[in-house]
Image: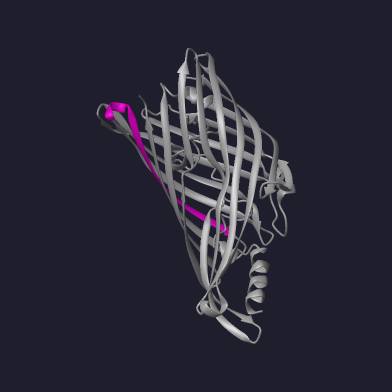
Amino acid sequence: MIRLAIRAALLALAGSSALGAQGALSLQGFGYPGGGLSTRALSAAGALADFDPQSPMNPAAIVLNSRAQGYAQLEPEFRRMTTGGSSVNTKTVRFPAFSVSGRQGRATFALSFSSFLDRTWANQYSDTTLVGTERLASTVITQSIGGISDARIAAAFSPTTRIHLGAAMHVYPGQNRVGIGRVFSDSARAGNFATTDAYSFAGSAISFGAVWIPSAHFLAAADIRLGNRVTMRLGDSVTVGTGKIPLRTGLSVSYNGVPGALFTARIANERWTDFRSLVKGPTRIRDTKDMSLGAEIAGPRVGGVPMAFRTGIRSRDLPFDVGGAAVKEQTIGGGMGIPLVGGRAALDLGLVRASRTSGGLSERGLVLSVGIGIRP
């Protein structure tokens, strides 16, 4: 009877979504929207995204790659969330982007795989539970593994030297395994228990973009993503709900009139309420706005190729509420690009400090991003 009561209590706890279990403002709802930013774009706080070939945002930007390239990225984040007088530390290691691109004649093609929503976290805390007439000490372990990815195939061409156009098809596969377990100090008497729910996602979208050079020192870029249906299932067959991949629009302008420097401003909107029919329970979802300013400045030469230094600031909304209150994110970033092998490879390093707030809750995140591109 003791074991049956414990299992019932554990299953009830697993069905809830507690902020304390996640220990992060940024991982609510279906997870954290990384935004498909390469290390270069992230270092400039997202401002360079529409002009960056490695960021799968604007399909027209891939034409700015001078030749074939492969790119991969690693991105650990260290978070500290504070509520009242207590704090919780968590860590997530992401592999947010991978891409390959090549040129054939006047056209450029690229295949990329990036993080769309990341919901990977783990936490544990000490607890006691009343079973019958006895109170037993235990450790509760909660975790979520997975998220939704964005697999994109893109093509771009240049009708003139001043205009670049692109289009892409996106597929959004995903899986999220949410589990909770309880380990008792006296496991010989009570046993240890765990339960896991596995959710899968499948969706698609198309996107279009352009890069325009109206004059010698100005560039402009625009992109739009049109979402199609996305389906969420429990296990292999039970449909939990359907929605649409959010509509996204973005607009950027750059100025390079200062020798060796590029200054960029970007604004984007994402209609996350297209996801609303997938959201269950008390979680609310909001449309979001994303604004950023950034700069990239040439540094000393390494092997005849200049280094690049980047910095930027960003303000954006996150789509999933906490207790009915919106989550705001402010970031400041910096980093550098180091050419290797005479420019045939590049190592990008970025460091971003994020501040997230919602009501009386606050979270500080430190993101270290490492990207490497190889041009054979």
How far from the left and from the top, in percent, is residue 204? 65, 34
Toward the left, the furthest residue is: 303
From the viewer's perspective, tell me whether residue 218 is left or right of residue 177. Answer: left
Q: Is residue 313 above or below residue 192?
A: above
Q: Is residue 26 above or below residue 133?
A: above
From the viewer's perspective, tell me whether residue 144 is left or right of residue 45. Answer: right
Toward the bottom, the furthest residue is: 133
Queried whether the magenta region covers residue 153, the answer comes back as no
The quarter of the picture where residue 205 lies is: top right
Q: Nearer the viewer, residue 61 or 11?
A: 11
From the viewer's perspective, tell me whether residue 116 is left or right of residue 351. Answer: right
How far from the left and from the top, in percent, is residue 4? 66, 74
The quarter of the picture where residue 212 lies is: top right
Magenta portion: prevailing SS class: strand
Q: Which residues are magenta?
A: 341-357
Please identify the quadrant where the N terminus is shown: bottom right
Queried whether the magenta region covers residue 342, the answer comes back as yes
How far from the left and from the top, in percent, is residue 352? 44, 49
